[in-house]
Amino acid sequence: MSNLDSLRYDAYISCANSNEDWVQDWLRVRLERAGLRILTSYELQGGRYKVTNIEEAIQTSAHVLLVLTPQWVESEWKKFEGALAASDDPAATDRKIIPLLLQDCDIPAHLAFRQPRDFRRPAGRELQIRLLISDLLPPPTEMKQAPPTLGAKILSWVWRHPSQQRRQSLSC
């Protein structure tokens, strides 16, 4: 996976033109509502080489979401995006690519072994989006507790030994 300091986006979404409305109006809204930073192929910089744009989008994103449909599979550019993202994480140990199955299609061989999130059934989409958000969020970090101060140690001892405290207050 890319160096964490160079990541500007939590996910780059690759989809066919025919699925742009679903991505923008349904998927992206929910991901951004969860606080995730999203980039789509429709926001890439104009005037640059397309390959450079795609490469930079993949390198600056923690994950690449591939919205799999027959149109995506048929597109040479989309297959290129998938292959380029797969080259960053060929063993899938970093989960760089997360396939999103939107319609039945022939999944390319280099993606077939990766577990997809299944958005084919509208009734199951809310569960799938929650699972996807969980996939995209960074793992929680362990909070390290600071060592107790001398005052905290004394106060802790006093609370654990109330009878000692009473004897001292009675002898005064």
Image: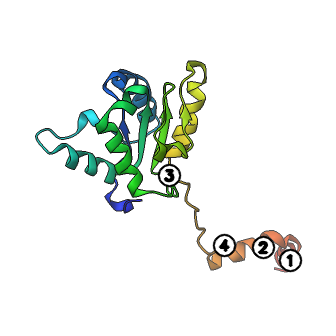
Q: Which residue is at a point 45% across and 40% down the rendered structure image?
A: 108
Q: Position of residue 128 (x, y in %)?
A: 57, 32
How much space separates mark 3 and mark 4, taking CA atoms? 44 Å
Secondary-structure class at tag 2: helix
Which residue corresponds to the image point at 55% horizontal and 36% vertical from the top-left? 117
Q: Residues within 10 Å of mark 1 (few under 14, many from 20)?
A: few
Q: Mark 3 or mark 1: which is in front? A: 3
Contact, mark 2 vs mark 4 (Cβ under 8 Å): no
Q: Which mark is residue 130?
A: none
Q: Are marks 1 and 2 in contact (CB under 8 Å)?
A: yes
CB under 8 Å between callouts 3 and 1? no
Q: Amino acid at mark 1?
A: Gln
Cα separation, mark 1 vs mark 2, equals 8 Å
Report helix, strand or loop for mark 1.
helix
Q: Earlier in the sequence, mark 3 or mark 2?
A: 3
Q: Residue at x 38, y 22 (%)?
A: 25
Residue 40 appears in the picture as rendered = no
Q: Which residue is mark 4?
A: 152
Q: Amino acid at mark 4?
A: Ala
- Which residue sits furthest left? 47
Residue 107: give x, y in percent of width and height. 48, 36
- Horizontal side, residue 55 vs residue 147: left or right: left
Task: Residue at 89% x, 73% y: name it.
Answer: 163
The residue beneath circle 3 is 95
Residue hosting label 2? 158
Task: Tell me which numbered mark, 1 or 2, is placed earlier along the sequence.
Answer: 2
Front tag of 4 and 1: 4
Say what secondary structure mark 4 lies in.
helix
Q: Upstream in the sequence, badge 3 or badge 4?
A: 3
